[in-house]
């Protein structure tokens, strides 16, 4: 189709749109789009699993829409400066939209300025910037989940287990002695999950006593080292380990396995994410339960939003809150419903 003909078709379509008729002209003519992605750390388990889903959804969408989708996924290796440069280069390479998993969620300004100056929309995801920063320009979006919900559900899992299983109260004092493994300092999911998990236990009638905490940056190896130290420090007193994510819960389990403590005397361990290894640990009864962070849902919503933006298509089917946010719900996973999640059907209650 020649350029002139396209322009004419576009003009005709715009007339029809005003009359309430056909789809956006550009949506019909776009044949090729480019979506850039930059990750705070490609070795983060949850995000790498989410990106696998994202890439698969992009392939499905390409097939279904007949629009060629060029994806470029970059790793910022935990450097905000590197990420700023990556966004600049993705924009220069002609990305129609860039998905940004901010390294430092308090430092989005360079990226939002680049976006506005070049008129390239940004979808932030997983690491939530403060609401005022998302308001800085009309074409800034956020895809993620509500941190407080994950903390609440983790607290419910822990409270139910403590109430139902008398053996968890090792010293039989009726109080749950716990430690927390926290993600990165300053990350919304570390701060909010820690607060809500414990508050929920208390609201559900469990008396709690915090023995200690350690920051393990979402990381399994760090969590193993820090848990080993706490097991020694609190010598047999820990009844519950609340981890802000599954990788850290798995690190705690690694430390328990390496200790002399028999499995029946392990403290309860709860996590969040429902990563493949996290689900295995629930299945093997090493973890009491986890909270499913819907990576399939987040990947799909982000792809749909990016596609709609890049093709100038409709956002009608995207569950945008306040025109800016997409949030997927979390779900509790225990022995009772683990099959639903192992089957990778996405979040099913
Ligand atoms: C959280 C997730 C963690 C980690 C973190 C990175 O939502 O639960 O496992 O991936 O995001 O920002």
Image (tube, rainbow, N blue to C red):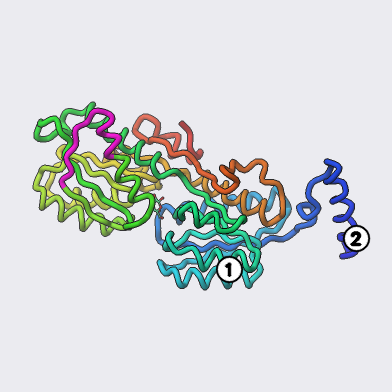
Note whether residue 64 is visible.
yes
Callout 1 touching callout 2 (CB < 8 Å): no
Query: Which stretch appears magenta?
Result: 198-211
Few, some or many C-alpha atoms within 10 Å of disc 1 (few <14, some 14-19, many ≥20)?
some
Quadrant (top left, top right, bottom left, bottom right) of the N terminus: bottom right
| Residue at 64% from the left image edge and 49% from the top image edge | 60
Q: Is residue 44 left or right of residue 194?
A: right
Q: Is residue 206 left or right of residue 14?
A: left
Q: Is residue 228 left or right of residue 28?
A: left
**Per the image, is 287 magenta?**
no
Ligand 1 under 8 Å from disc 2 Cβ: no
- How far from the left and from the top, in percent, is residue 263? 18, 41
Q: Which residue is mark 1?
A: 114
How far separated are the C-alphas under marks 1 and 2?
A: 34 Å
- How far from the left and from the top, in percent, is residue 64? 70, 48
Few, some or many C-alpha atoms within 10 Å of disc 2 (few <14, some 14-19, many ≥20)?
few
- How far from the left and from the top, in percent, is residue 3? 87, 65
Vertical arrangement, residue 38 with respect to residue 59, above or below = below
Q: Which residue is mark 2?
A: 5
**Observer-nearest residue: 149 or 334?**
149
**Per the image, is 201 magenta?**
yes
- How far from the left and from the top, in percent, is residue 216? 28, 57
| Residue at 13% from the left image edge and 45% from the top image edge | 261
Give whichever of discs 1 and 2 has the lower sequence position: 2
> Element at badge 1?
helix
| Residue at 32% from the left image edge and 48% from the top image edge | 244
**Observer-nearest residue: 192 or 42?**
192
Q: Is residue 259 left or right of residue 109?
A: left
> Element at badge 2?
helix
| Residue at 90% from the left image edge and 58% from the top image edge | 8
């Amino acid at each position: 189709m020649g350029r002139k003909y396209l322009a004419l078709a576009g003009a005709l379509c715009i007339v029809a749109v005003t009359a309430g008729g056909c789809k956006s002209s550009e949506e019909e003519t776009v044949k090729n789009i480019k979506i850039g992605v930059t990750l705070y750390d490609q070795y983060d388990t949850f995000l790498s699993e989410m990106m696998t889903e994202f890439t698969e959804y992009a392939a499905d969408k390409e097939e279904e829409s007949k629009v060629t989708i060029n994806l470029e996924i970059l790793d910022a290796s935990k450097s905000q400066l590197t990420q700023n440069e990556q966004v600049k280069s993705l924009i220069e390479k002609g990305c129609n939209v860039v998905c940004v998993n901010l390294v430092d969620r308090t430092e989005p300004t360079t990226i939002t300025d680049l976006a506005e100056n070049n008129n390239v929309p940004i979808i932030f995801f997983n690491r939530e910037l403060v609401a005022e920063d998302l308001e800085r320009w009309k074409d800034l979006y956020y895809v993620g989940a509500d941190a407080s919900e994950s903390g609440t559900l983790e607290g419910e899992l822990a409270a139910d287990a403590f109430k139902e299983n008398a053996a968890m109260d090792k010293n039989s004092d009726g109080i749950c002695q716990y430690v927390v493994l926290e993600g990165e300092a300053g990350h919304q999911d570390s701060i909010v999950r820690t607060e809500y998990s414990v508050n929920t236990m208390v609201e559900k009638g469990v008396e709690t006593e915090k023995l200690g905490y350690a920051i393990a940056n979402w990381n399994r190896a760090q969590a193993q080292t820090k848990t080993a130290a706490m097991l020694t420090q609190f010598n047999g007193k820990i009844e519950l380990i609340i981890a802000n994510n599954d990788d850290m819960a798995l690190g705690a389990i690694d430390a328990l396995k390496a200790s002399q403590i028999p499995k029946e005397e392990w403290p309860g361990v709860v996590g969040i994410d429902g990563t493949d290894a996290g689900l295995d640990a629930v299945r093997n009864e090493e973890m009491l339960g986890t909270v499913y962070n819907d990576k399939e849902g987040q990947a799909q919503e982000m792809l749909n939003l990016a596609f709609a933006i890049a093709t100038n298509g409709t956002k009608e089917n995207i569950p945008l809150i306040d025109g800016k946010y997409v949030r997927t719900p979390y779900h509790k996973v225990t022995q009772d419903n683990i099959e639903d999640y192992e089957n990778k059907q996405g979040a099913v209650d």
